[in-house]
Image (spheres, rainbow, N blue to C red):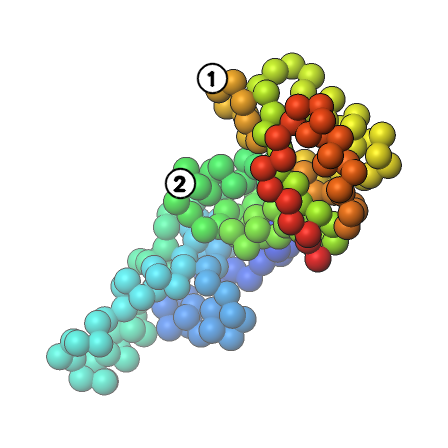
Amino acid sequence: MFVGRYMTANPLTVPENMPVQEAEEIMRKHKIRRLPVVKGEKLVGIVTEIDLLRVSPSSATSLSMFELNYLLSRLQVKEAMTKNPRTISPEATIEEAALIMRENNVGALPVVENGKLVGIITESDIFDAYIDLMGLRKTGTRVVIDVENRLGVLAEVTEVIKAHGVNIISLACQCKEEETSGEVVLRLDTQDPKNLLAELEKRGYRVVHVTGWS
């Protein structure tokens, strides 16, 4: 799963010298919360709704409406934007994008290829990728089992599932290296996993949780 598949291609951009009021209007009109900022064809920043609010005069100001409008007309996007934002390649994985965004506390990354802005990926796009990865839009059964943290355990579990003629929609494993056990979360393409679960428990695997998914 790569950034290029989930990003918004050819995103709206604003020049760095655009008045803040105009940038706010673009965000409202298109129902977006951030805009890449360019100087010519070069990406120089990114600006968000919060950035624009931060530089705008407070509602508690003593300035007159005329003075407020004059001040806002002179404020430019470059005074509010984050300069030289972190970027990512369209060939990067979704996991890389998620990690960069989380570690840098940002909600979006401009996507750059060969020095050119080609897209933007946001936290909502990451959620979409996760939903697809986990098969959350497919009907089936979600099963959590407790397993030993040892070599070959996943192969054994999947072999039992295969023997019962059940397809695996998705599989996730949480086994920390220093721990002796962990959990495997399976989404199975069946509404009736009773015999399969009985076989797993017979083989020593503890079924922690089972729920239908539709």
Question: Dot 2: few (<14), some (14–19), or many (≥20) neighbours within 10 Å?
Answer: few
Side of 178 relative to 91 (left or right): left
- Residue position for label 1: 178
**Picture coordinates of residue 188 (x, y %)?**
74, 42
At 78% from the left edge and 28% from the top edge, which residue is drawn?
Answer: 160
At 66% from the left edge and 23% from the top edge, which residue is drawn?
Answer: 204
**Relative to 7, residue 115 above or below:** above
Quarter of the image that includes the N terminus: top right
**Relative to 45, residue 53 above or below:** below
Q: Spot the residue most to the bottom.
A: 65
Q: Are marks 1 and 2 in contact (CB under 8 Å)?
A: no
Which amino acid is tagged 1? Glu
Is tag 1's residue or tag 2's residue first in the polypeptide sequence? 2
Which circle, 1 or 2, is nearer the viewer? 1
Q: Nearer the viewer, residue 43 or 104?
A: 104
- Residue position for label 2: 104
